[in-house]
Amino acid sequence: MSNCSGESHSVARRKEGSIRRSLIVSVIALCTLVSVITTVQSDPTQAATDRSPATTSGPNPSSTDNELRGVSALSATDVWAVGRYFDQRTRIYETLTVHWDGRRWSRVRSPSPSVTANALNGVSARTATDVWAVGNTQSRNLTFRWDGAAWETVHAPSYSWNDQALYAVSARSAGDAWAVGYEVSNDTGFDETLTLHWHGTIWNRVKSPNGDPFTNYLYGVSAYSADDAWAVGAVGVGSNQVRTLILHWDRTSWLPVHSPDPSSMDNRLAGVSAASTTDAWAVGSYRSDATHEYVPMTLHWDGTVWSRVNGPNDVSTDDYLSGVSALSATDAWAVGQSFDPLTGEYDTLILHWDGTSWSQVESPNPSSTLNELNGVSALSATDAWAVGRYLDDATGVYKTLMLHWDGTSWSQT
């Protein structure tokens, strides 16, 4: 495998001129994963096996790469986070699921069906015995379900013979969940949106629109009710522009909804969260026409239109938001990463909405080089979680990062 600096998935994909391959895979070391995926062919006969040790361990099983990409909190003693790690024994990336029991984080065994690379990108916990996690291998979608005792692989339809991936999941009831991502069309070879619906027995593919004939991706989903769900992402326009993509489910079909594009070059949405039918947030980043730097973007739905809301980092350099969790009209969190041009350090970025404006809240940065947050889940005004990864200065190991909000400050757990 190639040797690279290990840029974060969000940073790397922002720097890419196209939203082709680099946009669709969130990675710990982008060039490492690309090398694995492009040089090793998957085995179509592979079984859904779990090569992890029988016993649980800490949240950093790898001595090189560990990362969390999604988090979902049920209670103060029941929180799930998912991602991936590099297994030194098998020399491949394995799925990673960790659980908070109110005292500590512990790793829980999860299947890794591919002999090339496995990743979990999103998680949605509905009850203590009903949790969904979604992701991908090189050639198939992954959907796992926690039944209170173990993670079980649930068949997810894979319609593409080429690349496909699921990036987010939102479960509203035992018979109503959505998973979104992208797939490469067998007919055209182009990237198309992918939406799967769970109705209690199986996952079914539901037709979803594409804003461009060539490149379309969905990165976030939030289901508020059976007839009110949102999915967000990005769509390529020709070869020089990327614009936001927002779809709405009205119980019958997914329909595109107009969304702002602050930049004439590059606009992307990474996460969405609905607090009510008239209150939803979508977050991401756009590339400033003036400075050509990436700026955090927050969009708000008021029941009629999506509009851009300015944040405190609108003039910062190379910042982005990757996740959002909305509790009410006066309480929402957004997380991501910010770049300090003076130190060259990538720091965690946490913003809070109080009903009037977004403000930046101080957050821990255990690394002097790279810190990033990929997901956030808020339970109450005094209980929220954010997850990602950081580069350990002493060991050079990428480690999982879990932050907790207690109503006063964010702290590392």
Image (cartoon, grey):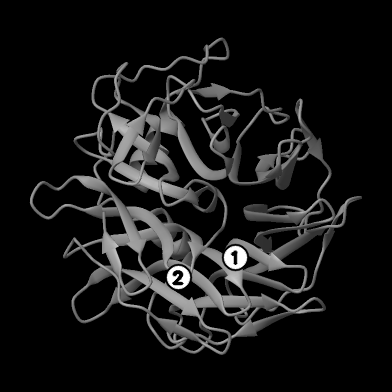
71 or 241, which is in the foreground? Answer: 71
Q: From what the image shows, is residue 241 above or below residue 329?
A: above
Q: Quadrant of residue 87?
A: top left
The image shows residue 20 at horizontal and vertical percentages of 57, 51
Above or below, comparing residue 182 to residue 296 in the picture: above
Dot 2 corresponds to which residue?
A: 320
Give, as a three-letter code, the residue at label 1.
Leu
Horizontally, residue 129 falls left or right of residue 94, namely: right
Percent position of residue 199, x then y: 79, 34
Residue 276 percent across, percent down from the top left: 72, 68
- Residue at image position (47%, 21%) is 114
Q: Amino acid at mark 2?
A: Tyr
**x%, y% of residue 177?**
71, 42
Mark 2 and mark 1 in contact? Answer it, CB < 8 Å.
no
Res 7 seen here:
no
Q: Residues within 10 Å of mark 1 (few under 14, many from 20)?
A: many
Residue tagged by mark 1?
A: 269
Residue for point 37% across, 80% down: 317
- Image position of 142 with respect to 330: above or below: above
Of mark 2 and mark 1, the one earlier in the sequence is: 1
Q: Secondary structure at mark 1?
A: strand
- Relative to 238, is 61 on the left or the right? left
